[in-house]
Amino acid sequence: MTTPRWTPAHLPPLTGKTFVVTGGNAGLGYYTSEFLARRGASVVIAARSQQKAGAAIASIRSRAPQASVRSVTLDLADLGSVEAAASELSAGPIDGLILNAGVTGQPERGVTADGFELMFGTNLLGHFALTARLAPTLLATSGSRVVSLGSISHEFFDLDLDDLQNDDYSSFRAYGRSKLAAMLFAFELDRRLRKAGHSTRSLVAHPGFALDSLSAARPRIGMKRSNPFVRTALQTFAQGKDAGALPIVRAAADPVAQGGDYWGPDGWRQLKGAPSVVGARTRARDIRTASTLWSVAETLTGVPFVI
């Protein structure tokens, strides 16, 4: 007998639980927010643009009129904004912190408000500082989870600890390294949480090769499907961002998920498929590199992260 394909309907009711989703106004973050809200969770969309966050909230409520969804302003490329958002969110509780937002491509090397290379500064340092500042709230919420977004791109590059700021800039390499750094941080976080005896867990999830054009239409946030011929061609090796969000949702809320898991599509080369626990490259779990990166992140952000 064939096992039914997993959907968010397989989750237990999430009423009474609160999830914070960075970048929850669009793409993977939007679908993650919608799926969690439709299961009864209270969702906080942390986004730079309150206008876009408002459109996302309206879209979610059009599908789940009773959904509890609100927003908070967060710019991960500005540590001052991170501190302000964390202050607002720290009243808690937080059952799940989903570190989704990020910069995926930048033709020319950019910098954050604090002078860090944009992808490293946003994808790792901003989320590191946010998690560190929210740690007391997370630790006070029994069984809480932190879910970081990984990427297939972590398979292509080693982390250069002597060039974390990507002075020798290549957009795809900088992105791959930033996602590898996020995965190293997440797995190290779980190791430290376990060692300290906390019930909070850290997991990683990735969406496979997820495209806007294959996603379920959400006109309020500008998500429109491509024509049927294009979809047919792309669907052989890719999936929509609604499908790509499913590993994130399972990592955040499925009772079977465990700390240290890496969730992603179970198909060929993890490009598409059902959300499952998948394998990560050894480099993403290297303890020495992760420990060094943790110390560097504390120094650069000025935010100590003691568990």
Image (cartoon, rainbow, N blue to C red):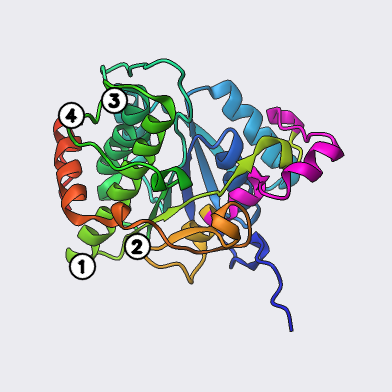
Question: Which badge, 4 or 1, comes first in the chain's sequence?
Answer: 1
Q: Distance between the Cα atoms at labels 4 and 2? A: 25 Å
Q: Residue at x 63, y 33 (%)?
A: 56
For the N terminus, the image quarter is bottom right
Question: Which badge, 4 or 2, comes first in the chain's sequence?
Answer: 2
Q: Nearer the viewer, mark 2 or mark 3?
A: 3
Q: Distance between the Cα atoms at labels 4 and 1? A: 27 Å
Does the magenta-highlighted stretch encompass residue 286? no
Q: Distance between the Cα atoms at labels 2 and 3? A: 28 Å
Which residue is identified by label 2? 260
Span shown in magenta: 219-247
For label 4, the SS is: helix
Amino acid at the residue labelled 4 = Leu
Which residue is identified by label 4? 300
Question: Which badge, 4 or 3, comes first in the chain's sequence?
Answer: 3
Q: Nearer the viewer, mark 1 or mark 3?
A: 3
Vertically, is 5 above or below 282?
below
Amino acid at the residue labelled 2 = Gly
* Mark 1 residue crowding within 10 angstroms, few (<14) / some (14–19) / many (20+): few
Q: Distance between the Cα atoms at labels 4 and 3? A: 15 Å
Q: Distance between the Cα atoms at labels 1 and 3? A: 36 Å
Q: Residue at x 40, y 68 (%)?
A: 258
Q: Residue at x 73, y 42 (%)?
A: 234
On residue 166, which mark appears? 3
Question: Which badge, 1 or 2, comes first in the chain's sequence?
Answer: 1
Which residue is identified by label 1? 197
